[in-house]
Amino acid sequence: MVPIKIAVASGKGGTGKTMVATSLAVCLAEIHSVQILDCDVEAPDTHLFLKPTITENQPATLLLPQIDEYLCTTCGICVDNCVYHALAKAGDKILVFPQLCHGCGSCQLLCPEKAITEMPREIGQINLGETDSGIRFGMGELTISEPMGTPIIHQLKKYSDEAREFIILDSPPGASCSVVATLYNTDYVLLVTEPTPFGLHDLKQMIGVLSVLDIPGGVIINRDGIGDNQVENFLTGTPYPILMRIPFHAEIAQGLARGQVLVDFSPNYSEQFNMLYENIINIVEHRRLLPQS
């Protein structure tokens, strides 16, 4: 069985992304096998709500080029082909700028003198474990001062448990490379937004990303009742339906502040999340039956 991979994303931080991801995981875990991966490696927080027992820690590394000065002829091929400008020619030397390197390996492949090798540099860590309810858990943590979370996200996704029925990915906020890395190869994306001008602006960005990646999705409006109707009006002209509304309520804020999962302190939302994932299952299974172009 191929697991259904659901990403939970938002154009901005603080919209309730983790609230939705953890609630969905808890509801699914009642009758399905589930894994959740926290891909918000700069500020992971799903562990604060699910409280997993961490059983494994792995270093997250980035492969950096190392120049052998005895073999290097400073031809500059590696410099010319580095799209990230992580290499520079300075006199009779090739300089490496680690903070710019994405570890793509193109310099090593293109070097005619075989003067470049790749050496791992630790940029964070990956924590793996399981919750008391049997949810497999994975979390990436980017070391402070490191500029790029994308390599950690790629490594974290390699720990996807393909034996699970569902894999939920809690995405970073925004529409950056880290978000694209998280959403890539997922089956469905839940976009969490709020009914404000800022929420609408960032929602439009995320819908643009989904359109390019050709991933189906739906919208959850959090803090419903504040702001205006611009988000709802905009969505009427898109293929992205409003799947759920979560009101702006002090009880919800208080429960989350205590580190509780929404469906645990407000069980009435369990039915809505159950209906939500049943709709997602139908959409994903239908798409999988379509002929591949």
Image (cartoon, rainbow, N blue to C red):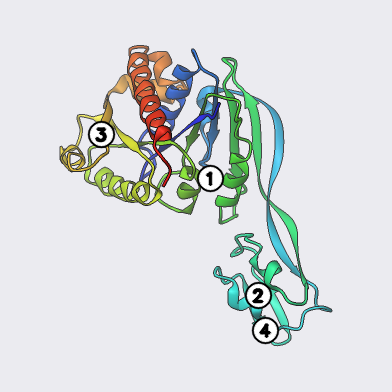
- Cα distance between the residues tagged 2 and 3: 47 Å
Q: Which residue is mark 3?
A: 241
Lower sequence index among marks 4 and 2: 2
User: Residue 225: x and y, percent?
Assistant: 20, 29
Lower sequence index among marks 3 and 4: 4
- Cα distance between the residues tagged 1 and 2: 30 Å
Residue found farthest to the front: 291
- Which amino acid type is marked by label 1? Glu
Q: Are marks 4 and 2 in contact (CB under 8 Å)?
A: no
- Cα distance between the residues tagged 3 and 4: 55 Å
Q: Residue at x 53, y 27 (%)?
A: 48
- Which amino acid type is marked by label 3? Pro
Lower sequence index among marks 2 and 3: 2
- Which amino acid type is marked by label 2? Cys
The disc label shown at residue 90, or none: 4
The disc label shown at residue 42, or none: 1
Which of the two marks, 4 or 2, is nearer to us in this view?
2
User: Residue 127: x and y, percent?
Assistant: 65, 34
SS category of the residue bearing label 1? loop
Lower sequence index among marks 1 and 2: 1
The disc label shown at residue 287, or none: none
SS category of the residue bearing label 3? loop
- Cα distance between the residues tagged 1 and 3: 30 Å
Please state, as top left, top right, bottom left or bottom right, where the N terminus lies in the image: top right
Q: Are marks 1 and 3 in contact (CB under 8 Å)?
A: no
